[in-house]
Amino acid sequence: MAELDARRAEVLGNAARTIQRLIRTYIARKEFMALRKSAIMLQSHWRGLLACKLYEQLRREAAALKIQKNFRRHIARESYLTVRLAAITLQTGLRTMTARNEFRFKKQTKAAIIVQAALRCHLAYSYYKSLQKAALTTQCGWRGRVARRELRKLKMAARETGALKEAKDKLEKRVEELTWRLQLEKRLRTDLEEEKAQELAKLQDALHAMQVQVEEANARVIKEQEAARKAIEEAPPVIKETPVIVQDTEKVNSLAAEVESLKASLLSERKAAEEACNACTDAEARSAELQKKLEDSERKVDQLQESMQRLEEKLANSESEIQVLRQQALAISPTGKSLTTRQRTMIIPRTPENGNVTNGETKVSPDTTLAISNVREPESEEKPQKSLNEKQQENQDILIKCISENLGFSGSKPIAACVIYKCLLQWRSFEVERTTIFDRIIQTIASSIEIQDKNDVLAYWLSNSSTLLLLLQRTLKANGAGSLTPQRRRATSASLFGRMSQGLRASPQSGGLSFLNGRGLSRLDDLRQVEAKYPALLFKQQLTAFLEKIYGTIRDNLKKEISPLLGLCIQAPRTSRASLVKGRSQANAAAQQALIAHWQSIVKSLNRYLDIMKANHVPPFLVRKVFTQIFSFINVQLFNR
């Protein structure tokens, strides 16, 4: 029972304490709520009072600012109006003075200017007419002489097959020049006709004006006589008869003098009109002579065009005959190798397809004489041309064999590109309509870069192709054939290598291609411009495409090599983070070392590629572009992961 009582007392005590705690909490909360409510009421009233005071102060300040603004605006406007009125008064006076002076000056100098202008116009026109007549006479005589001389030369050159191409080019230039001169003469004739019409119109206007003045003077004389007669009739008979007669006679005399002066001026104007008519007839005669000369020149142009067409037909026939004879010679010879194995030394005449000097004679070895003696008679007639083609073919074979090997570099200049450029320039391959050397060079480059894993070969041909492309860009000058592929040229100029060639053309010493300025290769400023035909322009486009291909291959190879290492670098920090959570310091250090090793491998790959491109003297412009794109690729991979 004692334990139960103790337990009961404990339970009752706990209940009493709980009730007391709740009651005290309720009372304290009630007091706090009342206190907070009263404090909020006081704060709101006090803030309202402060806001009213602040509003009143702001309202007074706004009213004061408005009053100040209006007062200042009034003062400023009054001062501005005063200054403007004074300025307007001064400007009016100055402008009036200036206008008065200008009017006085114009009035004084107008007559002198008119006289001077008329005299200078007459002198200049006379001098121009004399010069024009002399120049046309001299030009017509000289053109006829030059045309006869050129026709004789062309007739003599048409007998030889090798000179047909050169004659064709000269005739084309001559036809263009004659058409231009024909257009010039037509323009001169139209100008003369226009000037003649303008002069006639001016003279007719002057004659009409003089007639109007004479008619007005006659009308004034008649009116004055009628007024004098009326005054005599209306005047008194004795007193005012004498002064009226004197005044009328003076007026009549003055009018008669004016009439005489007007008649004299009319006669002078008629004489000037007759002189102008004579000048017009002379101009018509000169225009007729010029028209006859123009017709003669047109006839000569037609004759030259017909002769050019005949020469073109002869050239086509001779080329077909040469091809037939070449096929017959190949069919007669037992093997194709027997012709190439024979040693022969000869002096090759210069043709549009090669650049050697013409000597007109050939030196042939005994073996060659034996081989030629066994050929038919048509082959003996075409012996110089055949030997020329065979020698050119041998030279091309030697060039292809040389560039198929790694020739290396002379200082910092790629030898292969220099050799190709010098040979093409010496053979005049850029100026011919048909040739196979460009296709053979492109095939050699394509066969060399078939294996895309050899970075040394790719870098070697990247250097050579960029150098050769720059030389072609500096040398070739597109003619009419260049307009056949405008879209291709626009696309090339818009690409990376088009911008590179344009930048290098603008500044040959910049862009990292200063290695072309040595003594072993002609300087870019000394390169002569050559009118390129379609094969040369096509070769330049193909070379640009190969340059882009080689550049992209080297960049892709470098990307493939560093991609696995880059993936390892990205995955390594995860293991290091896990090792930090677990507290394994040794594993963390190993992971950091592995991460550093991966980055060092990437740096080694970049250094190796840089050394390869430096060893092959790749232009620094391309090297910078490669590494810029590689670093962009690394940034993109890091960002995506």
Image: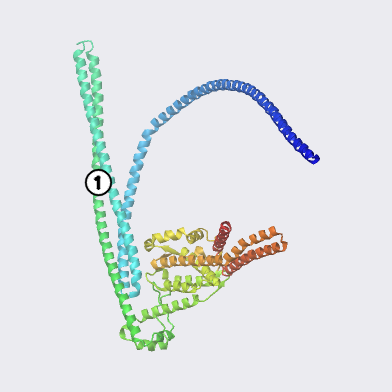
Q: Nearer the viewer, residue 522 or 20?
A: 20
Q: Depth check: 612 or 510 in front?
A: 612
Instruction: Examine the rendering and report whether any part of residue 268 can be seen.
Output: no
Tell me the colour scheme of the image.
rainbow
Query: How far across and down, in percent of the image, does residue 176 sit?
Result: 33, 61
Q: Quadrant of residue 55?
A: top right
Judging from the image, what secondary structure is the residue with disc 1 in? Answer: helix
Q: Give the total number of marks visible in the rendering.
A: 1
In the displayed structure, does residue 200 sit left or right of residue 510? left
Quadrant of the frame with the N terminus = top right
Location of residue 106 with respect to 333 vertically, above or below: above
Residue kind at label 1, given as amino acid type: Cys
Looking at the picture, does residue 5 appear above or below residue 292?
above
- Residue 609 visible to the viewer: yes
Depth check, front residue: 427 or 513: 513
Q: Quadrant of residue 205?
A: top left
* Residue 229 percent across, percent down from the top left: 19, 18
Which residue does the numbered mark 1 point to in the structure image? 280
Quadrant holding the C terminus = bottom right
On screen, 139 above or below 319? above
Where in the figure is residue 393, as x and y percent of width and height?
42, 78
Q: Is residue 165 left or right of residue 614?
A: left
Rendered location of residue 481, percent (x, y)? 37, 63
Q: Residues within 10 Å of mark 1 (few under 14, many from 20)?
A: some
Viewer-side residue, 76 vs 447: 447
Left or right, 332 with reference to 638: left
Seen as rendered, the residue at the extreme front is 1
Which residue shows up at 59% across the image and 63% down it?
Answer: 567
